[in-house]
Amino acid sequence: MIFGEEEENGFMDQPQQPRQVRFDISQMETVYANFFALAGSTDELVVYLGANSPLPNMPQPVLRVSHRLMLTPPNAKRLMIALQQAVKTHEDRFGPIELPPQQRPDQHP
């Protein structure tokens, strides 16, 4: 059972045995992302991840998109809930996360 979902038949006759899952991290990559963009359709949501490395005297920063994460809408919602819970836990422990005001693309500094 994940995130409080009920069993398909609606009954919980027998206690659930914990499912054992092994993670193969032998080919895992770690990337840093301080930029994301979203796109989607009725069948999928797409998250583009990348890094913004502004250079002095560059009028337009280069956003290097390195990864694309494609999710079904139900899995995107599960990810959203997990991220909300993780951020709440972080803020409960370390204090509120303050975000700067968002600047619209048509506004110039």
Image (cartoon, rainbow, N blue to C red):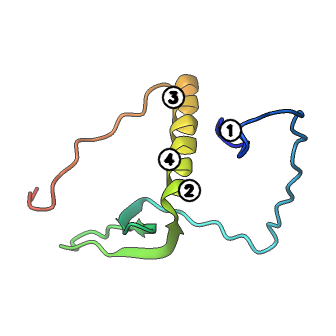
Give me the C-alpha separation between circle 3 and circle 2. Answer: 24 Å
Residue that carries the numbered disc 1 in the rendered image: 6
Q: Residue at x 36, y 34 (%)?
A: 98
Q: Residues within 10 Å of mark 2 (few under 14, many from 20)?
A: few
Q: Quadrant of the N terminus?
A: top right
Q: CA distance from mark 1 to mark 4?
A: 19 Å
Which badge, 1 or 4, comes first in the chain's sequence? 1
Q: What amino acid is labelled 2 in the image?
A: Asn
* Numbered disc in front, either 3 or 4: 4
Q: Which image quarter holds the C terminus? A: bottom left
Q: For numbered disc 2, what is the local secondary structure?
A: helix
For badge 1, the amino acid type reads: Glu
- What residue is disc 2 on? 75
Question: Relative to residue 37, is residue 10 depicted above or below?
Answer: above
The residue sitting at 39% across, 66% down in the picture is 42
Q: Earlier in the sequence, mark 3 or mark 1?
A: 1
Earlier in the chain: of badge 3 and badge 2, it is 2
Disc 1/disc 2 C-alpha distance (Å): 16 Å
Taking the spot 18% from the left edge, 51% from the top edge, the residue there is: 103
**Toward the viewer: 55 or 65?**
65
Which label is found at residue 80?
4
